[in-house]
Amino acid sequence: MHIYYCVMAYNEELLLFRTVKRLRTKDTTFIIHIQKSVDMSSFTKNLWGKDVFFIPNGERIDTIWGDITCVKASVKMFEYAKRFHEKYRPKEPAYCVLMSGSDYPLKSNEYIETYFSRNYPKSFFGWCDSFEEWKNGKSLLSNALKSYWFSFPNTKLKIQIKPFRYILPRCFKNTNVSLKIIFSVMLQICMTWGGGNEKIFLAKANS
């Protein structure tokens, strides 16, 4: 079992160095994407070896938290992992593990490798369609207006919706219907402003 650790980082160079050192085995490869606006030299001077690959300067992305750029950077790392695996280990089972540069393992390497081996080829990626959740009557709308960000495609502008939970309920008696209408209008504005070429991605805030 080979594991490709795909790490998206922009700071915490020493923590990333410790994480790689901690997870490194003969069956691991580290593919690291450093945010485009960050100087890579502070990372590359401590991290090197045949099992460590940095996304090249010309392919790095200026990632923004909660934005489609994070997805694009992730896909870029997965593409390299696939390329490496097909070239060097085409017959060996493998997994890609997506990580942040702020992550650190809580389990041993033996535990991680055994867990993946026992569950292979199960995929641990999941996704949901935000708009479908609305149609199914789930609580995404109310949660989004409390703790979600709007990310405007093709721009670096983000707006947190959290303040609306204090204002809108006082303005409308039929809160659910009113919020849904306003939220839909805001989505249309975002897509129009962004050119309508990409979906609006909502990332749950830490607050």
Image (cartoon, helix red, strand yellow):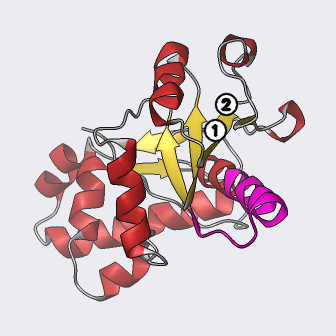
Residue 190 % position (x, y): 57, 58
The stretch in magenta equals 76-94
- Residue pointed to by mark 1: 63
Cα distance in 3D space between marks 1 and 2: 6 Å
Horizontal relation, residue 111 to residue 113: left or right? left
Q: Looking at the image, do the residues carrying marks 1 and 2 touch, with CB atoms under 8 Å apart?
A: yes
Q: Residue at x 55, y 67 (%)?
A: 188
Image quadrant in which you'd find residue 89? bottom right
Q: What secondary structure is marked by label 2?
A: loop
Q: Residue at x 74, y 61 (%)?
A: 85
Seen from the viewer's position, the closer of residues 162 and 10 is 10
Query: Measured along the vertical axis of the image, is residue 185 above or below residue 74?
Result: below
Seen from the viewer's position, the closer of residues 8 and 133 is 8
Which of the two discs, 1 and 2, labels the residue nearer the N terminus? 2
Query: Measured along the vertical axis of the image, is residue 20 above or below residue 152?
Result: above
- Residue pointed to by mark 2: 35
Amino acid type, callout 1:
Thr
Residue 98 % position (x, y): 52, 51
